[in-house]
Amino acid sequence: MTDAILAQLDRLVPNIPLQVVSQGAEALVLSTQTHPYAQKSGTFIIKYRPPKPYRHPKIDAQITRSRTAGEAKFMAKLRRAGIRAPNLVSVDPNGGLIWMESVGEILPNGAVSSLKNLLWYLEQGSEAAGLLVQSQLELACRHTGAVIAKLHMNDMVHGDLTTSNMLLQEGEAYLIDFGLSSYSALAEDKAVDLYVLERAVLSTHSVHAEKYNGWLLAGYKDEQCGAYASVGGKKKYSETLKKLEDVRLRGRKRSMLG
Amino acid sequence: MAPIDLDKYVRPGKDHFLALGLEGSANKLGVGVIKHPLGELTPENRALILSNVRDTYITPPGEGFLPRDTARHHRNWVVRIIKRALADAGVAGADLDCICFTQGPGMGAPLQSVVIAARTLAQLWELPLVGVNHCVGHIEMGREITGAENPIVLYVSGGNTQVIAYSNQRYRIFGETLDIAIGNCLDRFARTLKIPNEPAPGYNIEQMAKRGKHLVQLPYTVKGMDLSMSGILGYIDGVAKEMFGPQQKKLVDKETGEEITPEDLCFSLQETLFSMLVEITERAMAHVESNQVLIVGGVGSNERLQEMMALMVKDRKNGSVYSTDERFCIDNGIMIAHAGLLAYRSGQTNALEDTVCTQRFRTDEVFVEWRD
């Protein structure tokens, strides 16, 4: 199937060498060395939403356009707010294309430096290196928590926080994939965001989940109650945490009627 | 986990199990008799459907079915339908192993009236009772009929809209509606347009949609793995009221200049709602890396939905869609008998005091002991 999608993509951006990074239900992520309009070198990421054959062409065009434009706008706003995320290079809403700068590094074991891979990588070496690795793990989690705190302080919600949607570069955490992101000032929505992350950590890093979640939340708290203390960060933090307790108890949203 | 012994409870001297299933969670009253051979069910060792009788309570156009009237319909018909199901199957009450009934989810009053019939029969014939989750009944029947092994299940009916995957002894809900169910959305729009409820409002919308040509843009409300439909219904109801209410406003298609018809509205509603369903199903498939989809529930008999699902699955490696026809898609007694018998064979029965029905009974509350 990927071949057919790549053929469609080739019509939009002809003659560019592309490498598939990952494929989700909605979009294909590729990497390339070519900049769309400037003579710049470096690695760029293309996120492509292909047309879906099952949808009516009008519905399909509308969804592709609004989602692509929405995601690009969200990324631009992140940059203005100073939240670490990939820089937007160009966007083609009708074609469903977003170009962005690549973030992240390659770990010594060859994997991309997502928080997930980093944790897995460090866990493996932790027996030999001991304390040093412990602090590295803690730092990575705390940095990530701080970025999420910043996001929430700007009334933005990621919508799909998992450890594979966070990349580390030079010790700093970056957020990626804003396909499900939205704007919300409600403590409820932020709490759900944190809950989704908590569950994701639990399912991908079950052995040390408690420790990691503790560090992530600690980083979140330090940022909101530290850097944002003067703009009501403490109050927002306690509101969100209180809601998080509720969300944890409630789990899923709805009890079903026949 | 070692597979459990499914033949532990077989009656001495018999080489099969027989169960009677009673379903009445909504406006259909269904009774069925199913026969399981000994051993695990496989494509070579299948369950045998001995009878499957159904009677639907149909209301006039523009009206829905109310719990009290539906319960009265079920009470009036339950004895006749059970007699017919037993006669069709050629089975006497004494031959059965258990009586299975829908314990929920559903409308309270209709559930109550059917469970009373089940309790009465169980005491008359001295048989154990097995309470069945309606959703699990749909899933198990779909699996048995189609032979799908471990599919992502899209359960779409008048009261439910869920994307389900099996893991670790439970049917887990990945995505679901945040407000009304898809069948409810279609039925209520049918009422707005005064489309007949015979044989089913959704079926009539499907037939009208086949003649629709122009797409009216509607809201599209997928939220991650979940979806919301009440806003879409409100929007299209508003459009229909403008067109057919006192205003008699004429809407035209922007591209062709042709007038928008009720058929176009049905077409647009289906296209929008089904796109949303297929999208969340695809997301769940990508998430659990499955390539099979099983569509169950009344709306699952819609051919356009099946077609769209097939188009989506074609783009996935070795993908396949499984669906059943109206005999098994729409609520029926046989699915309750089947799922109930599976539970009975793994040792789950309900004591008389535990047969209280519940309107709220989530799919993931059931411990699925019979699968590994």
Image (spheres, coloured by chain):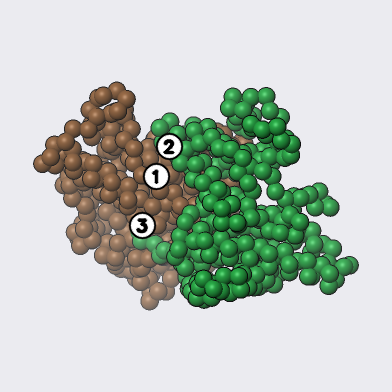
Chain colours: A green, B brown
Location of residue A202 with respect to B289 vertically, above or below: below
Q: Which amino acid, by three-letter code, is at mark 1? A: Tyr
Mark 1 to mark 2 CA distance (whole Å): 10 Å
Q: Nearer the viewer, residue A180 or B93?
A: A180
Mark 2 to mark 3 CA distance (whole Å): 24 Å
- Please rate how many residues cluster around mark 3, counting C-alpha atoms within 10 Å: few if below 14, some from 14 to 19, many from 20: some
Give how far across and how far down residue B7 sits, in percent. 57, 60
Q: Is residue A256 left or right of residue B149?
A: left
**Mark 2 belongs to chain:** A
Furthest-left residue in view?
B246
The residue tagged 2 is A62
Which numbered tag is attached to residue B302? none
| Residue at point 66%, 62% (across, down) | A144
**Callout 3: helix, strand or loop?**
loop
Give how far across and how far down residue B80 sits, in percent. 24, 54
- Please rate how many residues cluster around mark 2, counting C-alpha atoms within 10 Å: few if below 14, some from 14 to 19, many from 20: some
Q: Nearer the viewer, mark 2 or mark 3?
A: 2
| Label 1 in the same subunit as label 3 | yes
Going from N to C along the chain, the mark reached first, 1 or 3, is 3
The residue tagged 1 is B220
Q: Nearer the viewer, mark 1 or mark 3?
A: 1
Location of the N terminus of chain B (image quadrant): bottom right
| Residue at point 76%, 50% (across, down) | A105
Q: Nearer the viewer, mark 1 or mark 2?
A: 2
Q: Circles 1 and 2: CB distance less than 8 Å?
A: yes
Quarter occupied by residue B83: bottom left
Mark 1 to mark 3 CA distance (whole Å): 14 Å
Residue B348 in view: no
Location of the C terminus of chain B (image quadrant): bottom right
The residue tagged 3 is B179
